[in-house]
Amino acid sequence: MAEIKNILSCINKFRLSNICTVTSRQNGFLRVIIAENGLHLCHIDSGQIKKKIESEIAKKQAIFEYLRKFPLLPLDIIISSNTMSCRSISLNNLHQKDMEMLARNILNGKNGLINLVCYEKKFSYRTGTSTLCNMKLSPTLAKILQELLNIGNPIRTTITSPLWIVKSYFQTYPIEIDKFAAHIFAVNSSLNKEIIVLHNKQYVFYKKSTTQSLNEKVEIDEALKFLNQTFNIELNNVAIYKFDDTTLDTFTKSLNADMRLISQSENYSAMKKAVNLNFVAKSVCFCFCLFLIINSISNVVEIFDYGNRINKIKKMTDLLGSDVMKELTLWKKLNDYIFFKPLNIKTKLTEKFKTTHKKIQNISIKVDKKTKQPIFSAIYEND
């Protein structure tokens, strides 16, 4: 327990130091969406959009100048690409290195058709699913992404647009997650024209439109047809959500999600990664609960072991006769008659009578019951 308290104390100190150096989410954060047709920046403070900037790729300087004004604010980066594909993969006792190897194998297997693979970071890849997206990022967007990662702001999350939209919606309306077997997200904003389809919380269909306007009816009908043919899902078990710029602007909460970016040509690791305090707190609580569970199991096993020992002793005593059992009380009292140090009568006599010059006729010895020491009485010849 003392070790756990020390760990919690260190984590708390670490958390406080981060709050002092990095503005917390309650005080605001920055969000930048990058896409082929432009950049979109939102400065969010206390759940409200404080500043909004949209610019063309060629006029990106306005975005970066604003970011440099707030070097301590955490930055969320959302990647949107016309070449993106997105799907969920089932996890089966995988490790972090297995996910990275899978991402690199996808890169190598596409022969240059894609240059970036993003997969969802998870606490464990043992069970469940993980979202994986891959794309052919244009050289211009690849350069902008690298500049954003190295601008100096603490990077809290780097995530793809479909994952950001779905997680933001379900974080805002968690009751919707289990209401339907399938969900269709139709996004028609200034930067994103996409259809995202989930079945049993897994990404099963994704389409990014390259045209200026998205024919929602046609795209939704195509998604419904896909769900019916692939999973035999009826229309009444499908939720359809439509998003525009106004709807996306309501997503003003930061996400407890992040993605790892794997590329053959670029190093997309952020120079200054922001600490997700919620994740740290959850990790500490998980470790603490795990410790308590293990400790409780150990105590239960120990109790059962003691119980088995007691039962064995009882069985052994039951085999003993009644006369032996009656003698146990006598054996317990033997300590009252057993001296820790045997008496050396000769030494004691020498010490007692070494200064005596009379001739001793008789000596009697008596042991004091309390002190366990000998008491000598002597009779001399001339007395």
Image (tube, grey):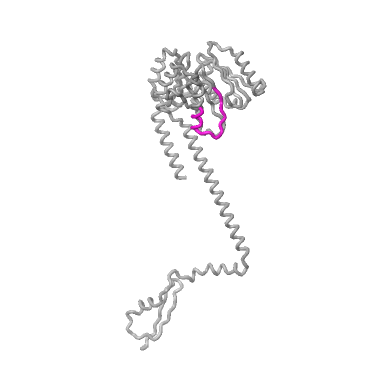
Q: Is residue 130 left or right of residue 15?
A: right
Above or below residue 359? Residue 105 is above
- Which residue is depicted at the point 51% across and 13% down? 190
Q: How many labels does the image show?
A: 0
Which residues, given as a range, are shown in magenta?
A: 86-102
Q: Where is residue 45 in the image (x, y as percent from the top left)?
A: 45, 22
The stretch drawn in magenta includes residue 294: no
331 relative to 22 in the view: left or right: right
216 vs 253: above or below:
above
- Identify the residue at horizontal 58%, vertical 52% (top origin): 304
Q: Quadrant of residue 129?
A: top right
Q: Is residue 94 magenta?
A: yes
Q: In which quarter of the image is the C terminus?
A: bottom left
Q: Nearer the viewer, residue 200 or 19?
A: 200
Q: Is residue 240 left or right of residue 354?
A: right
**Residue in the image at 41% along x and 33% along y:** 16
Q: Measured from the top left, where is residue 215 in percent x and y?
A: 58, 12
Front residue of 266 and 315: 266
Q: Where is residue 196 in the image (x, y as percent from the top left)?
A: 57, 20
Query: Which of the pair 94/376 is nearer the observer?
Result: 94
Horizontal side, residue 151 vs residue 175: left or right:
left
User: Residue at point 49% right, 68% down?
Assistant: 335
Determine if residue 243 is in view.
Answer: no
> Is 247 rendered above or below residue 273?
above
Q: Which residue lies furthest to the bottom in this view?
A: 382
Asked whether residue 238 is in view, the answer is yes
Which picture quadrant has residue 225?
Answer: top right
